[in-house]
């Protein structure tokens, strides 16, 4: 994979397709840019698609110091600028969606628009007795996995995290996927120990002037719904789409539905 050094860290990336509309895909925790493999071929028929491995993930450099989510936000900005992609569409999943939204609040000039699927921005969620226990359980899972990584048990942490979110799934994952998660475990440790892990500046994203698509799965854990509701109220130009038959990883679970929703929205909002 080609690479660029941004903010002192080497990031591996790939560009797919030759379309006029640039689209950057931002992956979530534990995985890497290849998590988009199921959707890239179809997206590349319409867009110039950039996938990359965030710092500490995949083939990108793994700094030895404690990393922060703010660094991942700055890396995304630098990557867009160094590759000359702005204004660009950015699509993020899970923590990748959080990173996308944070950059949208800080540097809206880099964006043509964005799509975000179920960011874990629990600080936005209004207190709800039906959902609060699930959010708290999610946070406990994150903290327990981070503690286990700190003890050196990367494989056990990866398995514990997967099983807490999708019981029985760990043994169903391909060996290469399990190995990737184990190797990326230190990056999750840094993310989970970042005090801004569940946060976004609502005032900043409320000023984002570009179109935004928020997606959620009808099979997803319910704790993401109140986050999507609050984001939809904050963003001034937003649409919400519920994808049928998918959960937290729509691009892997039901790639056609994800591609259709993303492609239709981008084309609708591109002059």
Image (cartoon, grey):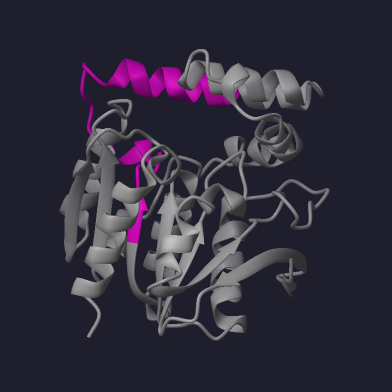
Q: Residue at x 39, y 51 (%)?
A: 200
Does residue 243 appear left or right of residue 172 in this picture?
left
Any magenta on residue 177? no
Above or below, 95 relative to 73: above
Q: Residue at x 22, y 33 (%)?
A: 126
Residue 206 in view (yes/no): no
Any magenta on residue 133? yes
Which residues make up the magenta segment?
115-143
Q: Residue at x 71, y 40 (%)?
A: 184
Residue 25 in view (yes/no): yes
Q: Toward which corner of the image does residue 15 lie, by quadrant?
A: bottom right
- Could you say where residue 260 lies in the image, as x and y percent from the top left? 27, 57
- The quadrant of the image that shows the N terminus is bottom right
Does residue 174 appear left or right of residue 245 in this picture?
right
Above or below, 5 relative to 225: below
- Could you say where residue 102 lies in the image, as x and y percent from the top left? 43, 59
- Could you say where residue 210 lies in the image, as x and y percent from the top left? 26, 73
Does residue 64 appear left or right of residue 4 in this picture?
right
- The quadrant of the image that shows the C terminus is bottom left
**Relative depth, front residue between 270 and 194:** 270
- Could you say where residue 195 lies in the image, as x and y percent from the top left? 54, 40
């Amino acid at each position: 994979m080609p690479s660029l050094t941004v903010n002192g860290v080497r990031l591996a990336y790939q560009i797919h397709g030759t379309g006029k509309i640039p689209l950057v895909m931002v992956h979530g925790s534990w995985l890497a840019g290849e998590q988009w493999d199921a959707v890239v071929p179809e997206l590349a028929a319409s867009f110039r698609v950039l996938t990359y491995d965030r710092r500490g993930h995949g083939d990108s450099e793994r700094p030895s110091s404690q990393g922060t989510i703010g660094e991942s936000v700055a890396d995304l900005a630098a990557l867009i600028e160094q590759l000359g992609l702005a204004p660009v569409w950015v699509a993020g999943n899970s923590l990748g969606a959080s990173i996308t939204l944070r950059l949208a609040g800080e540097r809206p000039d880099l964006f043509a628009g964005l799509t975000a699927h179920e960011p874990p921005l629990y600080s936005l969620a209004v207190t709800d007795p039906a959902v609060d226990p699930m959010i708290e359980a999610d946070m406990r899972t994150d903290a327990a996995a981070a503690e286990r990584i700190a003890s050196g048990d990367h494989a056990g942490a990866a398995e514990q995290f997967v099983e807490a979110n999708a019981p029985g799934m760990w043994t169903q994952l391909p060996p290469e996927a399990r190995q990737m998660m184990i190797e990326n475990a230190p990056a999750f440790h840094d993310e989970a120990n970042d005090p801004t892990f569940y946060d976004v500046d609502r005032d900043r994203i409320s000023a984002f002037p570009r179109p935004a698509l928020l997606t959620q799965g009808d099979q997803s854990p319910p704790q993401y719904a109140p986050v999507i509701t609050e984001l939809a109220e904050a963003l001034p130009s937003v649409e919400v789409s519920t994808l049928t038959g998918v959960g937290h990883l729509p691009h892997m679970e039901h790639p056609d539905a994800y591609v259709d929703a993303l492609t239709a929205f981008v084309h609708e909002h591109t002059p």
